[in-house]
Amino acid sequence: MSKLTHRTALVVGAALVLSLACKTSKPDTSRVIANVGGDKVTEAEFQDVVKTLSPDPLEAQKFLTDPAARDERAQLASRIAMSKAITAYAKQTGLDKEPSVQRQLEQQQASVYFQELAKRRMSTAAPTDEQLMAFYKEQVERMKASGRTTVPPFEAVKTQVAEGWKQQRVQTISQDIQKEIKAKVPITLADGYRP
């Protein structure tokens, strides 16, 4: 099973909602691949969802064209159709109007927006050896400060250092995004609700 389909179960609903919400007014003339209660899912929409799910354009293209991925494409199309059916049913039953559901959707939407902001700021380039060495030296200093006397050599832990660097980069980007948002959208909390 490809990496693409492992992520699918978690994000297909959010990706579908965002891709469908961002439709242009230009009519989609691509082939209809699913009909969900009279609402159509086109091949172009399906391709957009796949491209949204995969950060790697080559992986997305392979998923879309590889004959060996036919069953996985069919499973994804089925999940997309079911997501649309669930959304339609929720609207038919008025579930989409319930305050608790609206609050949950708002939180999920904010999470998707935040993830997209972070993704746009993350460099896809691997860190340089200089960046890794600087990060390694910082970690060594922290270990020594906490009393640890033996430290593995850089080459022995280079893979773990790269992962640690990436995690720190994600955390830094997350903090930067939050600062930027707070500067542009002021937040005031009442007494008793401030951290």
Image: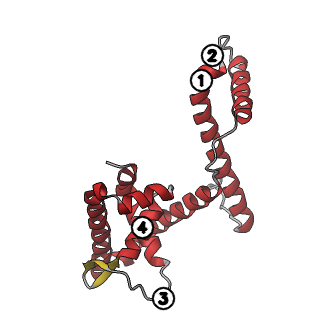
Mark 4 → mark 3, Cα distance in angstroms: 18 Å
Q: Amino acid at mark 2?
A: Pro
**Which residue is rendered at x = 49% and y = 63% of the image?**
107
Q: Position of residue 142 (x, y in %)?
A: 71, 24
Mark 4 → mark 2, Cα distance in angstroms: 44 Å
SS category of the residue bearing label 4 = helix
Give yes or no for contact between labels 4 and 1 (Cβ–Cβ under 8 Å).
no
Frontmost residue, 178 versus 83 = 83
Q: Which badge, 4 or 1, comes first in the chain's sequence?
A: 4
Mark 4 → mark 1, Cα distance in angstroms: 37 Å
- Depth check, mark 3 against mark 2: the one in front is 3
Is residue 89 positioned above or below 184 on the image? Answer: below
Q: Which badge, 3 or 2, comes first in the chain's sequence?
A: 3
**Which residue is rendered at x = 46% and y = 73% of the image?**
19
Q: In the rendering, which numbered label is found on residue 26?
A: 3
Q: Position of residue 99 (x, y in %)?
A: 42, 73
Q: Which badge, 1 or 2, comes first in the chain's sequence?
A: 2
Frontmost residue, 181 versus 82 = 82
Q: Amino acid at mark 3?
A: Lys
Q: Amino acid at mark 1?
A: Val
Dot 1 corresponds to which residue? 157
Dot 4 corresponds to which residue? 49
